Amino acid sequence: MTGAGGIPGAGVSAVVMNVTATNTSSAGFFTVYPTGVTRPLASNLNWAAGVTVPNRVIVPVGSTGKV
């Protein structure tokens, strides 16, 4: 994340992202979280089959600047 797409390469503690599930064939979820840590139990987005669901997330970046 950091150092790409206009995001500074240093001094970034978190990013704001729009995440969207679309054209889904079954229900599901995903979790956005920093690299280098265990996945949290809570998800950022849940969806049912056949729907489009967006969500804005604020997530810390890991020590390598990635989520």
Image (cartoon, grey):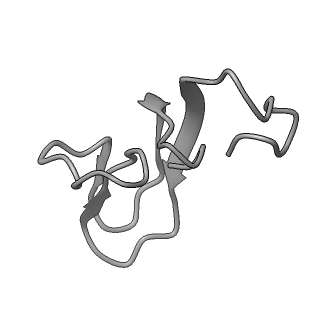
Q: Is residue 7 left or right of residue 67?
A: right
Out of 32 and 29, give the one closest to the viewer: 32
Q: Is residue 41 left or right of residue 59?
A: left
Residue at image x 12%, y 48%?
41
Residue 34 on image: x %, y %: 41, 45
Residue at image x 57%, y 26%?
16
Q: Is residue 1 left or right of residue 24?
A: right
Number of numbered discs overlaid on the protein picture: 0
Residue 61 on image: x %, y %: 51, 37
Q: Relative to 61, does residue 27 appear above or below in the rendering?
A: below
Q: Relative to 32, does residue 13 appear above or below in the rendering?
A: above
Residue 42 on image: x %, y %: 16, 42
Q: Relative to 41, does residue 7 appear above or below in the rendering?
A: above
User: In terms of image quadrants, where is residue 45?
Assistant: top left
Residue 13 on image: x %, y %: 54, 23
Residue at image x 60%, y 43%?
65
